[in-house]
Amino acid sequence: MSKKNLKPGFAEGYNELAATYAAQDNEDSHEEALRWWHKSAESGNTSGQFKLGLAYYEGKGTPQDYEEAVHWWRQAANNGHIPAQNMLGQMYYRGYGIEQSYEEALHWIQMAARNDFAEAQFRLGNLYEWGRAVEKNYPAAALWYQKAAKQGHQGAEKALRRQITLGDLLYRPQPTEEMITGWLSPRYIQMKDE
């Protein structure tokens, strides 16, 4: 069956079949999952493209291949798949499978962060805190860490605690207890009170 003749529902079925194989977590099942994710990805399904990129990134069912991961994540990212945008940004940041570019990393991570993707919000906070592709901006870093922390992102919570501990060296004005409480997840607040 050619890509043009593929009905939209088939791609989702391919994804479900691939996920069933991947859940068995052995080499043969990963190879079979890869085959079905290829079918889904080639039909233009962004979830299939993302999962196929992840299989290449992790080396499950295939030798690890960062360039193939980037290829499939770019396909999905260009079609609005938010986790793929984040992963593509991280590949640019690290220079895995593609030439390192903090500017491209910023572009893709911002796209995902603006769509409330916690991991991308955390990474965007990192870019602002460390001055990668942007001028160092601790309040902007804190803002993005806050957004991720509100979704329970542990790395963002640690980054906020670090900024709060360093106090006025990094964040002016000094955050109040009310601000801190609003930034951190309920789980952290509960641990703090125990």
Image (cartoon, rainbow, N blue to C red):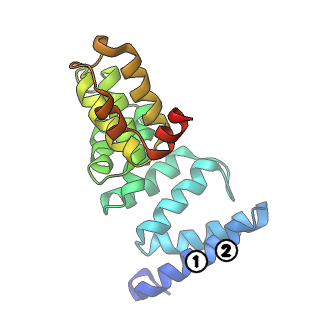
Q: Quadrant of residue 7?
A: bottom left
Q: Which mark is residue 16?
A: 1
Please report the residue visible at 54 percent of the width from the left and 44 percent of the height from the top. Answer: 66
Question: In x, y percent, where is residue 85?
Answer: 36, 51
Question: In x, y percent, where is residue 192?
Answer: 51, 33
Q: Quadrant of residue 161?
A: top left
Which of these two is toward me, 112 or 191? 191
The disc labelled 1 sits on which kind of residue?
A: Glu
For mark 2, what is the residue?
Answer: 20
**Separation (CA) of disc 2 from disc 1:** 6 Å
Circle 1 sits in a helix, a strand or a loop, which is it? helix
Q: Is residue 93 above or below residue 2?
A: above
Q: Are marks 2 and 1 in contact (CB under 8 Å)?
A: yes
Please report the residue visible at 48 percent of the width from the left and 79 percent of the height from the top. Answer: 11
Which of these two is toward me, 75 or 154? 154
Q: Is residue 93 left or right of residue 10?
A: left
- Answer whether residue 132 is visible to the viewer in this image: no
Please report the residue visible at 48 percent of the width from the left and 35 percent of the height from the top. Answer: 155
Query: Dot 2: few (<14), some (14–19), or many (≥20) neighbours within 10 Å?
Result: some
Q: Is residue 9 left or right of residue 114?
A: right
Query: Dot 1: few (<14), some (14–19), or many (≥20) neighbours within 10 Å?
Result: some
Please report the residue visible at 43 percent of the width from the left and 21 percent of the height from the top. Answer: 162
Q: Is residue 170 above or below residue 48?
A: above
Q: Is residue 12 left or right of residue 135?
A: right
Circle 2 sits in a helix, a strand or a loop, which is it? helix
